Image (tube, helix red, strand yellow):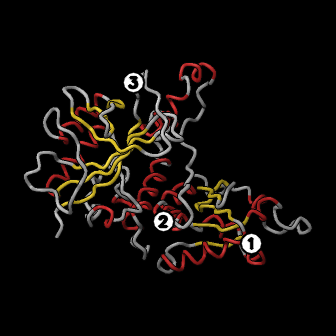
Amino acid sequence: MSSTFCLGQFIIPVSLPSPVNLTYDLPQLVFLQRGHKLVHIYCETRTRFGDLSEKQSQYLGPLLGPVSSCSTPVTCSEIPPNEVALVKLRAFLVTKNCITPQLRGCVFSRSEKIPEVQSAFAASEVELTPIWNYNPDVFFKIPHFTSRISPNSPFAGPPPTLSASLRQCRTNLKSHQLSALSFLLRNEHPNNNTKDLWYHDDNAWLRHYFDEESVSSKTEPPEDDRSQGSILADDMGLGKTLTTLAFILATCEEGRRFRKADPENRSSATLVICPLATLSNWQNEISLHFNNHAITYKVFHGDDRKKMTKEDLQSSMMILTTYEMITTSGNKRHHHQLTIESLDLFWFRVVLDEAQ
């Protein structure tokens, strides 16, 4: 059994020294050196690219070993037990298409050191995230470690309170889907707001690009600064539909509470609007991945909508409809026919599939 694992990947925006202006078409292989105060970033020719922040250096520096120690990549399937450094790194500097250069890397460690490494990354506020397409063959068959990620990590998977609901999902979500699920949950949390999004570490490049003073002087604080949703933009074939369905299932109780606050005008359902061509795919995904009746839904399209009542649409967990039903509001020659527009409902959530 392996005692060495890949713990995941990190992305750190890097502020380069002012005289340095670097643009490379390809990622540059780099290593880190622990200094007395800061961790330095060097390329293979020992050109210094920049430094980690004081906080990042304080917590991540000791993982490299004593002062002056340099990071090294994995060279075999096992890290020796007597290795001074707690981690091995495969790190790159990425500048192409980045307003602020990024230090990106994969982290490897022995099993007994994993809690200490995870704690250091958490304290440094650098997110250590699973690698959804990790290939062990590229790294001497070292397995990816995912089963004991810190529960406080935003990418550790769904909170325990949601685990019971997700037991009705017959398919184990992959690491990138768990990351996406946590991302969606975090963005809908009532305490989350646009200010937190602006100051999140992942958006340091955006703050660097804009003159923050000019932005703040020309804009007034919004009346409601809560997050207004998410964009799930994984590549095709990575299971965005399954992730969304799992999200709907995991938050069904919140939907019911939402309706109870105004039973006459609110619906507990997530309204999913999709192209007609993908309507059957949503239905197939529910049948394939979830227990019977785990996700209660109605299809608001064609003749089926004639049989529905307003209560059906308010009490279901999900309503599937098409863009045709939104843009045309049904058949205008039959004014008595139920339409999305005529319902005049406040939906718990709206999902736009293939939105462009």
Residue 17 lies, in percent from the top left, at 39, 24
Sequence order check, earlier mark of 3 and 1:
3
Quadrant in which the C terminus appears? bottom right
Label 2 crowding class (10 Å Cα cut-off): few <14, some 14-19, many 20+? Answer: many
Q: CA distance from mark 1 to mark 2?
A: 23 Å
Front label number (2 vs 3): 3
Q: Residue at x 55, y 35 (%)?
A: 225
Q: Residue at x 44, y 73 (%)?
A: 169
Q: Residue at label 1?
A: 301
Q: Secondary structure at mark 2?
A: helix
**Amino acid type of disc 2?**
Ala
Q: Residue at x 33, y 59 (%)?
A: 160
**Amino acid type of disc 3?**
Pro
Drawn side of residue 193 relative to residue 78, left or right = right
Compared to residue 170, the image places residue 185 above or below, namely above
Q: Quadrant of residue 16?
A: top left
Q: Residue at x 38, y 40 (%)?
A: 103
Compared to residue 244, the image places residue 48 above or below, namely above
Compared to residue 75, the image places residue 55 above or below, namely above
Q: Residue at label 2?
A: 246
Q: Nearer the viewer, residue 10 or 286?
A: 10
Residue 187 lies, in percent from the top left, at 49, 47
Q: CA distance from mark 3 to mark 1?
A: 59 Å
Label 3 crowding class (10 Å Cα cut-off): few <14, some 14-19, many 20+? Answer: few
Sequence order check, earlier mark of 1 and 2:
2
Compared to residue 211, the image places residue 104 above or below, namely below
Which mark is on residue 17?
A: 3
Circles 3 and 1 in contact, beta carbons < 8 Å: no
Q: Quadrant of residue 284?
A: bottom right
Q: Please give the count of numbered marks on the rendered protein.
A: 3
Residue 151 lies, in percent from the top left, at 29, 53
